[in-house]
Amino acid sequence: MKNNLSPEQLNVLRLSQNVINEIEKVIIGKKEIIVKVLLSVLAGGHVLIEDIPGVGKTTLALALSKALSLDYKRLQFTPDVLPSDITGFSIYNQETHQFEYKPGAAITNLFLADEINRTSSKTQSALLEVMEEGKVTVDGKIYKMPEPYIVIATQNPIGSVGTQMLPESQMDRFIIRLTMGYPDLESEINMLKSKHNLINIDNLKSVATEQELIFAKREVEKVYASDVMFEYIAKLANATRNHPFIKLGLSPRGTIALLKMTKATALLRGRGFIVPDDVHYCFNDVSIHRIIFSSKSKINDMTNEDILKDIINSVPVPRVNQ
């Protein structure tokens, strides 16, 4: 199988590298996180970042919107945020004697739902419905989300008082779950040294347009997957459903998400077809928030990551001609 990319795919590769380079001007030492967020965007999915405050989640989302020329909105979720704050509402105009729709915070290209676990389950459901259906219904009228539409939601795992963690059935709506984590020592030292030299986020360049992003997503969908690779992905999903330390395995939605992320990974690695290593790169981030692990894993001193690694090792890796 030839490794050459089409001219259109080469354009996507160049665009992606430009976006990564631009975001790295304000996010130091987190290239892999930047890449994975971009992969999820190219795969047409939404991102859940579960981490403590102050590690750059908001900066990452804003930098992504700047680099991709996307309209951006952020909402800090609190217990008093209502579903209508997300979806919008109708208000009566006394001059026109008609009801007018006032868009909610989620009506944008890139929506940052900050600390989504600090609001009510009803409000969470309103956002997740928008993410799934790509539209909102207010007073019987349907309003479609702009294209492209991306949600980056954050959860703070520390300080659980007054929080409502997303249930597994709703976590499934996010194509990946990431943890940014603290920077390593060298990156943090470089950040301190260069803090006064860092480019202001408002001065980041737009290196891609909305239409270019829409085009890039279509090119990702065209990445070739052989029957062998379809079977391999399906076998990995099936292995999660039969593992002794897993109560609930990967759903069919998760299997599709894994294929989409794998295709995006292949393209960013300079290939027009997927190979097992692309699947391995995405597997944990796509799977870990969709799977319910049993208590047996703790008894046997196995982490969730250990179990997913065991699944990868248990399924024979197919040979793909390159």
Image: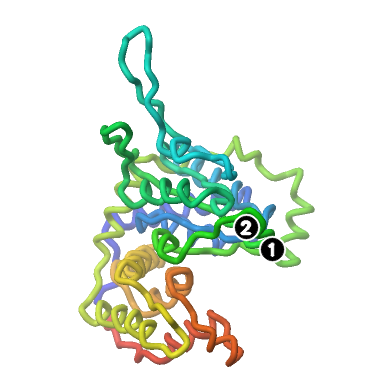
Identify the mark at residue 204; answer none if there is no mark: none
Which three-letter amino acid code belongs to the residue tagged 1? Tyr
Tell which circle, 2 or 1, labels the residue nearer the N-terminal end: 2
Q: Position of residue 222 (x, y in %)?
A: 24, 61
Residue visible at 69% across and 63% down? 182
Viewer-proximal residue among 28 and 175? 175
The answer to whether residue 69 is visible is no
User: Is residue 203 at least partly visible in the picture?
Assistant: yes
Disc 2 element: loop
Location of the C terminus (image quadrant):
bottom left
Q: Are marks 2 and 1 in contact (CB under 8 Å)?
A: no
Residue at left offset 52%, top offset 47%: 113
Secondary element at tag 1: loop
Tell me the tag on residue 182. 1
Nearest the camera: 7 or 106? 106
Q: Which residue is mark 2?
A: 156
Colour scheme employed for the rendering of this structure: rainbow
Measured Cα–Cα span from mark 2 to mark 1: 14 Å
- Tell me the residue at 63%/62% (across/down): 157
Which amino acid lies under the numbered mark 2 shown in the image of this protein? Asn
Q: Quadrant of the N terminus?
A: bottom left
Q: Residue 97 appears at what percent x and percent y?
A: 31, 11
In the picture, residue 92 is in which quadrant? Answer: top left
